[in-house]
Amino acid sequence: MFAATLAAQQLRIGYVDMKRVLDNAPQVVAGRATLDKEFGDRNVSIEMDEFKTGTLEARLLKADLSPGNKLALERELRELRRNISRRKEDLLDELSFRRTEEVQRLEEEINVAVKKIAEKYDYDMIISSPVIYANPDLDITDLILEQLEVEFAADQLELDSP
């Protein structure tokens, strides 16, 4: 009788690949674009200074500098490299912090989407990665991404309306 009860009570389980969600959800893509815009100028500035180091290095290779000018140029190059290194490290730290902030901000939105799909399709349990193994038949990641796209589009309409 116990086995019959278990067989009659089919448990519906779904699996969500969170890496795919975090790589492809429109909210995440939009957040990445915002971060690119936010940090773009600083990155361009660093790239320009890196180009300048190349120019200075090429100048040093020429044999037409006086010993005093060569020493000054080497000093400038060393200082520029240190400055670039510091700015890169600061930029990476800040970018990493902001990415984490964005993901944390989106976690609740993703959880709401998962809950809506679970209720809509009568799932008893949804598990997310990382897991050791999930049968591909249990993967509902596409449903979650579709739900997030619908919610993103609705949010965009809300933002665009007066």
Image: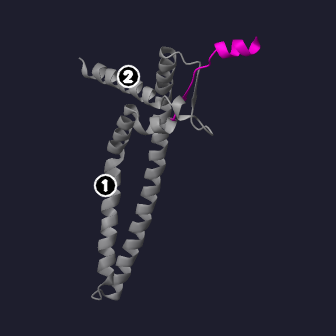
Q: Earlier in the sequence, mark 1 or mark 2?
A: 1
**Residue occupied by mark 2:** 151
Most extreme residue toward the left is: 162
The amino acid sitting under disc 2 is: Glu
Placement of 67 over or under 137, stated as above or below = below
Tell me if residue 89 is in the magenta stretch. Answer: no
Q: Residue 91 appears at what percent x and percent y?
A: 43, 51
Q: Which residue is pictured at 52% across the width and 19% down the height?
A: 118
**Residue occupied by mark 1:** 44
Give the residues drawn in magenta, as a range.
1-17
Q: Is residue 16 or residue 7 the one in the foreground? A: 7
Query: How far apart are the alpha carbons under marks 1 and 2?
Result: 34 Å
Please, what secondary structure does the residue beneath circle 2 have? helix
Q: Nearer the viewer, mark 1 or mark 2?
A: 2
Placement of 121 over or under 64, stated as above or below = above
Placement of 154 over or under 70, stated as above or below = above
Q: Residue 117 appears at what percent x and percent y?
A: 48, 20
Left or right of residue 8, residue 47 in this image: left
Query: Is the residue marked by circle 1 packed among few (<14), some (14-19), or many (20+) residues within 10 Å?
Result: few
